[in-house]
Amino acid sequence: MTMPAPLLDKDGVRLEADDAVATVTLTNPDKRNVQSPALWRALTEAGRALPGAVRVVVVRGEGKSFSAGLDRQAFTPEGFDGEPSFLDLARGDDAVLDATIAEYQDAFTWLRRPDILSVAAVQGHAIGAGFQLALSCDLRVVADDVQFSMRETSLGLVPDLTGTHPLVSLIGYARALEICVTGRYVHADEAARSGLANVAVPAADLDATTRDLVAALLAAPRDAVIETKALLQGVTGRTLDEQRTAERAAQGRRLRDLAGLGD
């Protein structure tokens, strides 16, 4: 069977879709799928190119590593071809610097959209930006060789690609602070035990386990999944009474829809 052509294949990112499932693959295994501004723009483009039928997005990396993080070339005076180096950005206008980082963050935030569920299938190194990409997904399946590490603070920086919020939400402030400040590795057993990973499996089983999870996610009706995800995403910003109100409103919409009374 001939697979359809990728919807996008550029700058180290490939997007493929098969009915309700899309796969976003980092495609630079020779460099352990290091990240760059061009890759971040391609990730953002992948999010915009998703067909409307897609319900689940799987994010994976080719080769032995999910992603070893930011390409250190960003910190050299020459930077990347056609791109301002990070050193040039630092010397520039505050508003431009802020807008540029916000643009980089867009590559990660779309994976939290309420109309899709995102699953990171993570093997090998997931460092810095790679760790944050995995954290941007709703769920994480990890291989037993996984090595998460948040190295930014050790390099004099901070994690700024939207990873801090899910990290604290998943494992709590104290453990998140310790992981970020020390930059140490978090291996598969700790990831599963702490809640960073939904499940850890032998590397040979990573793809099959991810497929099984995707099939289970697709079993429930789409609109109920969307409402449930929105409810859970809003918990931390609501009081109990506010959450009760949100639950009632969501359930009312579902009941009207099931009764054929929806808009």
Image: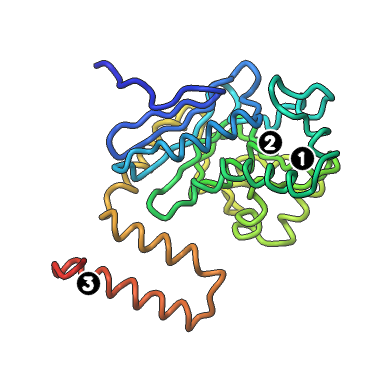
- C-alpha gap between disc 1 and disc 2: 7 Å
**Callout 3, which amino acid?**
Leu
- The first of marks 1 and 2 along the sequence is 2
Q: Who comes first in sequence, dot 1 or dot 3?
A: 1
Q: Which residue is mark 2?
A: 127
Does residue 166 sit above or below 184 in this rendering? below
Residue found farthest to the bottom: 241
Image coordinates for residue 24, horizontal then vertical, percent: 46, 32
Foreground pick, 32 / 172: 32
Residue at point 53%, 75% (across, down): 238
At x 33%, y 38%, the residue is 51
- Residue 101 to residue 15: above or below: below
Q: Residues within 10 Å of mark 2 (few under 14, many from 20)?
A: many
Residue at the farthest left position: 260
Identify the element where label 3 is drawn. Answer: helix
CB within 8 Å, label 1 to label 3: no
- Who is closer to the viewer here, 193 or 128? 128
Quadrant in which residue 157 is drawn = top right
Disc 2, SS? strand
Provide residue 180's location: percent of width, then percent of height.
76, 49
Q: Which residue is mark 1?
A: 151
Q: Which residue is mark 3?
A: 255
| Relative side of 67 to 98, left or right | left
Residue type at mark 2: give it: Ile
The quadrant of the image that shows the C terminus is bottom left
Q: Secondary structure at mark 1?
A: loop
| Structural crowding at the residue carrying mark 1, measured as other residues with C-alpha within 10 Å and reported as few (<14), some (14–19) or many (≥20) | many
Do labels 1 and 2 touch, CB within 8 Å? yes
Q: Closer to the camera, 174 or 33?
A: 33
